[in-house]
Image (cartoon, grey):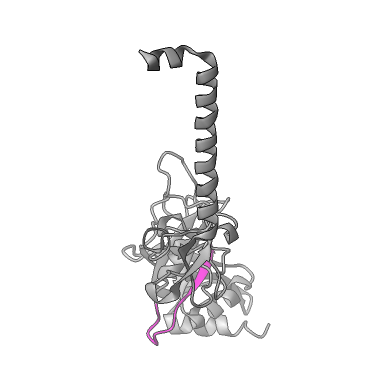
């Protein structure tokens, strides 16, 4: 009964409320102080990690620092937020640096992640990416997909002793398609709800073929044609056609290198 009477007294209730507020504020203050002075364990880079790089255990160290010294969105859980992830396309993590949000992404979030899986040539060297300009028709109704293998042909007009000829032959066989993009750089097949038209096919080529294709691009009245490996391609023309072997095609291109 006495407790009930006390609670009915407004002055007592006011005093008790004030005491409760002081206790809560003091508890919050002590929590903030302890959070600031008690160190936490955070991961950091043991060496400089470049863009598009998968982060491994061997590249991550740990140190204890005061929470108050942490600025920005620092990643604190190496197992779930860092290890096995990739550095972003425009991110280099310096040696000794902490890891921050935006610098580390999942593989599927990485722009042009296909470049990480670049195949190697017969000498064990990583191949190069070659941008091959295409359209809807030259991709056979948008039916060339990443992971496909294609052949490259050269078709060139030539004036030989006043007689017009079409020079034709295969430049390379079994070239891997890395990606198919539209005119804005979007991957054509990443969103099936959008009708994206192919503009560029990115191919994996070795250094020698890359150099050869760069020369072929500059030859007047010449076209490089993409052909699926399972398609038997032949030039249809009313003009005389001079069919070359693959080695002869490469020799034909080489004569234009110095020009």
Name which residue lies at 46% across and 41% down.
Answer: 195
In front: 211, or 93?
93
Residue 160 in view, yes or no: yes
Quadrant showing the C terminus:
bottom right
233 vs 195: above or below: below
Query: In terms of image quadrants, where is residue 161?
Result: bottom right
Q: Residue furthest front?
A: 2
Up/down of 34 relative to 195, above or below? below
Q: Magenta region: which residues? A: 120-132
Q: Main secondary structure of the magenta part?
A: loop
Q: Residue furthest left?
A: 230
Residue 107 located left or right of residue 74 = left
**Which residue sits furthest bottom?**
123
In the displayed structure image, the side of residue 194 where residue 15 appears, left or right: right
- Residue 207: x and y in percent read 50, 81
Pick the front one: 115 or 180: 115
Q: Nearer the viewer, residue 95 or 165?
A: 95
Specify the quadrant of the image occupied by residue 1.
Answer: top left
- In the rendered image, residue 122 lying in the magenta stretch gets the answer yes
55 or 118, which lies in front? 55
Residue 237 in view of the camera: no
Q: Position of residue 26 (x, y in %)?
A: 53, 42
Task: Decide: is 195 above or below 213.
Answer: above
Tally of numbered tags: 0
Residue 142 appears at what percent x and percent y? 42, 50
Residue visible at 42% across and 49% down in the picture? 190
Does the magenta segment cover residue 174?
no
x and y, in percent, of residue 132 in the image: 52, 64
């Amino acid at each position: 009964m006495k407790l009930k009477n006390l609670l009915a007294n407004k002055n007592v209730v006011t005093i008790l409320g004030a005491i409760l507020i002081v206790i809560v504020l003091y508890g919050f203050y002590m929590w903030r102080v302890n959070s600031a002075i008690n160190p936490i364990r955070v991961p950091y880079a043991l060496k400089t990690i470049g863009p598009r790089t998968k982060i491994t255990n061997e590249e991550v160290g740990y140190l204890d620092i005061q929470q108050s010294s942490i600025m920005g969105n620092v990643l604190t859980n190496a197992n779930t937020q860092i290890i096995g992830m990739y550095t972003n396309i425009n991110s280099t993590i310096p040696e000794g640096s902490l890891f921050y949000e935006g610098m580390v992404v999942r593989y599927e979030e990485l722009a042009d992640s296909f470049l990480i899986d670049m195949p190697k040539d017969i000498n064990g060297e990583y191949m190069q990416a070659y941008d091959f300009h295409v359209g809807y028709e030259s991709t056979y109704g948008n039916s060339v997909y990443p992971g496909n293998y294609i052949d490259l042909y050269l078709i060139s007009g030539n004036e030989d002793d006043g007689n017009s000829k079409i020079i034709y032959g295969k430049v390379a066989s079994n070239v891997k398609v890395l990606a198919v993009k539209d005119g804005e750089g979007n991957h054509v097949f990443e969103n099936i709800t959008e009708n994206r038209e192919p503009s560029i096919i990115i191919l994996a080529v070795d250094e020698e073929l890359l150099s050869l294709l760069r020369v072929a691009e500059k030859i007047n009245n010449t076209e490089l044609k993409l052909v699926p490996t399972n398609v038997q391609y032949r030039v249809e023309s009313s003009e005389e056609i001079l069919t070359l072997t693959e080695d002869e095609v490469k020799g034909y291109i080489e004569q234009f290198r110095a020009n």
